[in-house]
Image (cartoon, rainbow, N blue to C red):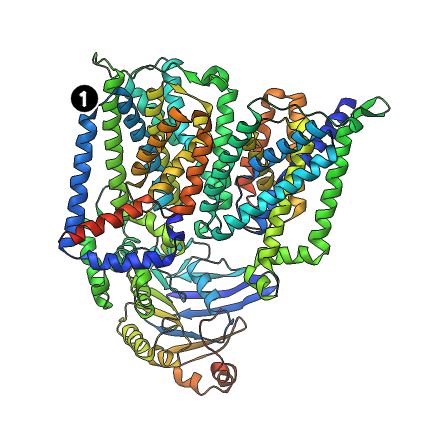
Amino acid sequence: MQLLEVQGVSVHFGGLAALRNVSFGVEPGERLALIGPNGAGKTTLFNVLTGQIKPSSGRVFFKGEDITHLPVYARTHRGMARSFQITSLFPYQSVKVNALIALQGVRRSRYNLTRYLMRDKEMQAAAQRLLEAHGLWELRDQIVSSLAYGQQRKLEIALSLASDPELLLLDEPSCGLTAQESAEITALIKELGPKITVVMIAHDMDLVFGVAERVMLLHYGEIVAEGTCEEIRSNEMVREIYMGSRRSLAGPTT
Amino acid sequence: MSGSSENHQSLAEMGAQASKIAAGRETWRVRGSLGITIGVIAIIILVLPSFVPTFVSSLVTKMMIYGLFGMSLNLIWGYAGIPSFGHAAFFGVGGYTAGILILKAGISNFWLNFLLAVLATAVVAAILGFPAFRVFGVGAGATNPIYFLLATIAFGEILSRVAIAIRPVTGGSTGLAGIPEPALGLGFKMTSGRYYYLVFVVTVVCIYLLYRIVGSPYGYALRGIHDNERRMQALGYNTWLYKYTSWVLAAVFGGVAGILFAYFGGIMHPTNLAMVTSDIAFLLVILGSTTVFFGPLVASLLYVGIEYLASLYLPDRWPLIFGAMFVLTIVLVPEGLGVRIVRGWRRLFRAAA
Amino acid sequence: MSQAAVTGLNGLSYAFILFMLSAGFSLTFGVMGVLNLSHGALVVFGTYVGLQIIDSFGQFWLAVTIAAIALGIIGFFIYFLFLRRLHGRVPEQAVLTIGLAYMAANLILWVWGPRAQIAHTPEVFAGSLTVGDLHFPLYRVFICAVGLVILGLLWWIQDRTRWGAIIRAGMDNKEMALSLGVNYPLVSTLVFILGVALAGVAGILGAPILGVYPTMGDNLLLLALIVVVVGGTGYIQGTMLGALVIGMLDTFGKAYVPKAALFFAYIVFIFILLVRPSGLIGRKVF
């Protein structure tokens, strides 16, 4: 059974079709990259997968279950997690608190009114493990808004891994990072192991070709090309649509 | 919410400062000194009545009641980021229910009365929570809380008019008067002197409970929702449930303050449900700093003091002074006094190395 | 049955008063995202000033004009001194303007005393319009006429003029409006001032109907609030519709079911919050 199955998903905003009849599947353990020019619908697709947007038509299946209308938070409990293109952290809390909150998200203790979170040995240890795994432990008491952008991006990804997801959706993980920072992210994703399936939106071709087994090209809301890295690299249409316009791409997608 | 709208610079500065203070001995000194100070203050409050004229004790009682009222609002305002402008609705329901139960239903046992009044407040909050959060939206606290604000204002005003209308039950526009001293049972005779201690105990217990809630996993979830609700949802939190339950919790504590108030003054007036009273709550929250746990309590001290002085020298101009407090707070100390006190405290205890 | 027609007129004129009261409030918060909770108190202040002029000089139209101007000036200062710096920080705006409302109400009390003011219908409008068996108070008809003119004017500005287009664009996207070379701060200030001035006019016109006493600001604010939420923000038609619903409900309610009348508006309010939070004709916010 495919881990994720998307069937005929379309999204219309007023008169604008952001996604048209998108269908594809993702096998467990796979590494899939979504590429495409600005406005192609990649983030919209993510929003449908995570439940922030309900599609105008079509269905989404996760582990065989129809999750099309499932609320955002419920999907995380099913094993999905997401990182955001525009860094979405808790700016007025410390790095450690960010980690704690993220770790709690899928635990029953998140409704607990009586424990002292700061004295909960198990949670503190879990937070330490998570932050150390991403090289953020030294920064644990710093308030997030005072961190450098690159550190914030790292935390962004760290938080999305906190729920121990089966499917990880990364939205432009290396957005705005330096070459070295991007290389670190690439290495990190590579080390994630076969228990996690990764679907990634990226503009950084080094990252894409470094990590992905399969690449999908989205253009004006439709999948126009799909294949292995080699196939995509040598695809004429891809070059035209995407590579040609790559020079004008200077940052986050819409 | 107001906490997050401060200029980011000072918070980043604080962040950097906080990082430096974070490890080791400095935290201990700050925390330890805080603990000791709280203990000392508690002791002072306990022994106060023996040394000062009764009107001072009376003021301190009021201060505790209002402080609790403010802190109950801060649970949702400062921590969860829900700026409710109708919190007096719960204060009033608590107080009125206590009064009505004694005067109309003959339930004079304090404990039973208390329980029922708290329950009533919770029920009202549970009901009002639905329309309230219908117009809150996701992360709307950061973008457009106007509708929510207006809705909460309206709730308080509407309840106040309901109180005026159902005269037989609530005493109408003149209010519910003649609420006697609480009867604790076991032949214990309550006097206004002893009431002081009852208020003290209840307030301390409530503050302790609030402290536990705020430091619990649930409490941290509230903070997360305040900072970034969308991310909380993506992390697996049913944010509506948190907002709704914190609303009810805050209402309950506000209701407790209202109950204490009812016994204190012996009278409940429709204005205790209206904006006039809600305004006191959020003045305390904003003056005290939304980001400081004890903030509203400190603000309450200042407020009660100023109110008392005004009643002595400028009784007719009190609303003017009251309004001026709002304006001056926003203009002079928008981040609140609590933040300034904490900063000064830290400086004091870091310097004393 | 014939009585219903007269009640209808009363309801309609009340609706127009509510409309004029609320239009300003709706504009400032629907358009600019600025919450001015001193709206009610300012209206009362303007009404008092106007009544003072009528008392001292007997000039109705002069009073209306001067009150409108006075409020416009006050509105300007409030915006310029305070609200301008609090853009986007709604709770702060709310707290500040509430403070101003208290101060204004107490100042009114200080200057004019606590008793209610008596507002007479201007002589020229005393009497009634007789149609068959029915006697329609002339003053009420006059209010409807004024209201209709103002409604028409505002509607026209909204739909047919550049100003209207700018304001509507600004509602959706302020940066875009700015980048189109619009002097948005100027537009905002003007909208704010106009809103307050219009509300002041409503206060004076409505004085014989609504009554005048120092603490009525709260009441007016609550009414404006309910009208705006029920009708929706962003469109002048919405505010008018909200005013109609509330005005008619309240007036007919008082005429036929006086005890319960008060609550009709509240019930509608809560119902709208639950079922149609963006209002009857409002920009979709939820």
Is C155 placed left or right of B170 in the picture?
Answer: right
Q: Mark 1 falls within which chain?
A: B
**Quadrant assignment, res A16:** bottom right
What count of labels does the image hold? 1
Q: Residue at x 50, y 39 (%)?
A: C100
Residue C11 versus residue C105: which sits nearer the camera?
Answer: C105
Q: Quadrant of the N terminus of chain C?
A: top right
Dot 1 corresponds to which residue?
B50
Residue B261, percent from left and from top:
35, 24
Which residue extends farthest right?
C132
Q: Residue at x 40, y 43 (%)?
A: B329
Residue C41, percent from left and from top:
56, 35
In the image, residue B294 sits, relative to residue C266, either above or below, namely below
Residue C102, percent from left and from top:
49, 34
Residue B213, percent from left and from top:
27, 41
In the image, residue B221 sits, relative to residue A147, either above or below, namely above
Residue B79 versus residue B341: which sits nearer the camera?
Answer: B341
In the image, residue B353 sits, relative to residue B105, either above or below, namely below
Is A174 placed left or right of B209 in the picture?
Answer: right
Is B88 placed left or right of C190 in the picture?
Answer: left
Is C70 placed left or right of B335 in the picture?
Answer: right
Q: Residue at x 64, y 48 (%)?
A: C235
Residue C126 versus residue A60: which sits nearer the camera?
Answer: C126
**Quadrant assignment, res C78:** top right
Q: Residue at x 35, y 70 (%)?
A: A198
Residue B217 visible in this rendered orientation of the protein: yes
Which amino acid type corresponds to the residue marked 1 in the rendered image?
Answer: Ser
Residue C1 visible in this rendered orientation of the protein: no
Count neighbours of disc 1 (C-alpha within 10 A) and say few if under 14, some if 14 to 19, many if 20 or more: few
